Amino acid sequence: MGDIKVRYTVETMRDGKAVTRIDVQAGSMVEAAETLGPVKSGLDREPTSGEWVRVTEFVSGRTNWFRAGV
């Protein structure tokens, strides 16, 4: 059997606004976030300033945030 892929929306966020948005299929949220470049996980809440990556699972709406460009 192959790897299970889930659909995600991946957005580059800057100061609270989406700069880019793509839909991807990936095996995890981290893998989805890395489609836009290197990221670091560990953000507990969505930042209000700076640059980060927001990943949302298409079906459930579950969202995680990652530091961009790390």
Image (spheres, rainbow, N blue to C red):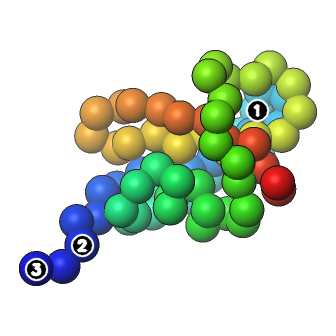
Q: Which residue is mark 1?
A: 17
Q: Nearer the viewer, mark 1 or mark 2?
A: 2
Extreme left residue here? 1
Amino acid at pointer 1 = Lys
Which mark is on residue 55? none
> In this rendering, is residue 21 above or below 45?
below
Closest to the observer, 60 or 1? 1
Disc 1 on helix, strand or loop? strand
User: Image point 30% across, 57% down: which residue?
Assistant: 6
Work out whether mark 1 precedes mark 3 in sequence or the reverse, and give the earlier one.
3
Quarter of the image where the C terminus is located: bottom right
User: Image point 67% across, 63% down: which residue?
Assistant: 36
Residue 50, how many percent across, how many down?
Answer: 89, 33
Horizontal arrangement in the rendering, residue 65 relative to residue 48 (left or right): left
Q: Is residue 12 visible?
A: no
> In this rendering, is residue 25 above or below 1?
above
Q: CA distance from mark 1 to mark 2?
A: 33 Å
Q: How many C-alpha atoms fall within 10 Å of the one at disc 1: few (<14), some, or many (≥20)?
A: few
User: Image point 82% across, 56% down: which residue?
Assistant: 69
Q: How many C-alpha atoms fall within 10 Å of the one at disc 3: few (<14), some, or many (≥20)?
A: few
Q: Quadrant of residue 54?
A: top right
Q: CA distance from mark 1 to mark 3?
A: 39 Å
Closest to the observer, 17 or 10? 10
Horizontal arrangement in the rendering, residue 35 relative to residue 16 (left or right): left
Which mark is on residue 1? 3
User: Image point 80% across, 20% down: which residue?
Assistant: 48
Amino acid at pointer 2 = Asp
Closest to the observer, 17 or 50? 50
Disc 2 on helix, strand or loop? loop
